[in-house]
Amino acid sequence: MKYTDIAIIGGGLAGSTAAAMLGRAGISTVLIDPHQVYPFDFRVEKISGEEQVGRFYETGIADSVLRSATHDGENWIARFGYLLDKKPSRQYGIMYDALIAAIRAEIPPPSELIYAKAVDVSTSAERQKVTLSTGEVISARLVVLANGLSVGLRRNLGIERQVLSAGHSISVGFDIVPVGRPAFEFPALTYFSERARKRTAYVTLFPIQNRMRANLFVYREVDDPWLREMRRHPAETMNAALPRLRRITGEYAVEGDVKIRPADLYVSTGYRQPGVVLVGDAFAATCPVTGTGTDKVFTDVAQLCNVHIPAWLATEGMGEDKIASFYDDPVKQACDAWSMGKAISFRKVTVENGLYWQAQRWARFLAGFGEGALRRVRGRISAGSNRSAHSSSSSSSSSSSSLSSSA
């Protein structure tokens, strides 16, 4: 039997990040995952926005990990075939398997990785026991379930999943290339839905190394024939859904496989138990359309590893009262509520046809247009000020030169 303080089951984004943080804190940790080289998985493909990047920095590993990602620097915003804004961007593109590899490279001793499947977990208020597919048994003070959508171990513990919205959204991922020219004009682009009846939220285009990656988000049933057409004729199907997109992108083609991932909104029940804590999608899943699932992971892991685990390990036992403090954490609760609220409202503002939601769509369009116009005005003022300053500096230098010559 191997003894450790923390056993983490699941080596994806949440589990690997937690192992890296705990290892850096000098806490004995075992990360359990069957994949020595993490396989391709159509999940997180970029880390973006001030808030999300800021949450990642709270883990302490962002600087090192983001060196493996592609920073685009500027994101164009467009709708109805009109370019609304060119926004400075903190957006980093990276395929999920590469992201996990970069995070695992930051896992130091005393954390260690064991490449096996956890087949059973038993818990108590003192020590927990994890049985592996290899027959090895791990004894830990705390088990962290970070195994995403997998439900087997949770059900063994009496933890169930309550689905709030089945088939809430569908994500589609593929590579896109320009036709008739070497590159796209934009560094990155977010193009929003044109019509509610198309049930399309938006498409985001962003670079990953020398590729331009596309993530298209739609609200459709999982058996919708549209998805079959998207696989067979992706460019034509996307053009039908977003007919004015090519005004911004120019002609384009889709290369390689088209990946499709449906997503449910769900929360866990029966999770307040001694000795085990759930993080990320193991606890609750939100909608990929909003991009807030990554915020949830970073918030869960940062609060758990920076605040709660050090406090829990300082005293004996791992009772339910200790575990409850994580689920009651106001920072975690606020992030969970914000993420779920965005998932519900974004779908409504995309597909609902009532006057209120039509007004919401136009308000967002006008707000984006106004923000872009203001940014352009500020840019012209700044450029004019720089020219004036340069002209004054040149005149001053010329005067000084003349005085020196006269002297």
Image (spheres, helix red, strand yellow):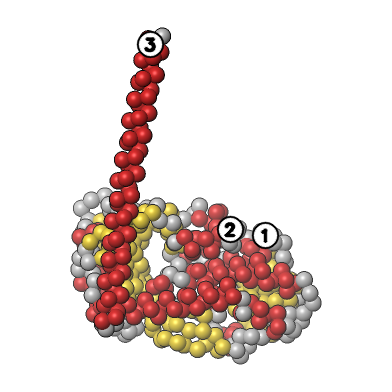
Closest to the observer: 265 or 352?
352
**Residue at mark 3:** 405
- Is residue 232 in view from this perspective? no
Q: Which residue does the image show at 50% across and 78% down from the upper left?
A: 337
Closest to the observer: 195 or 334?
334
**Circle 1 or circle 3, nearest the eye:** 3
Residue 73 location, x and y as percent? 40, 52
**Circle 3 or circle 2, nearest the eye:** 3
Q: Which mark is residue 280?
A: none
Against 178, residue 387 (above or below) is above
Q: Which mark is residue 61?
A: 2
**Residue at mark 1:** 24
Q: CA distance from mark 2 to mark 1?
A: 10 Å
Describe the element under mark 2 as helix, strand or loop. Answer: loop
Q: Which residue does the image show at 79% across and 77% down from the upper left?
A: 316
- Is residue 224 in view from this perspective? yes
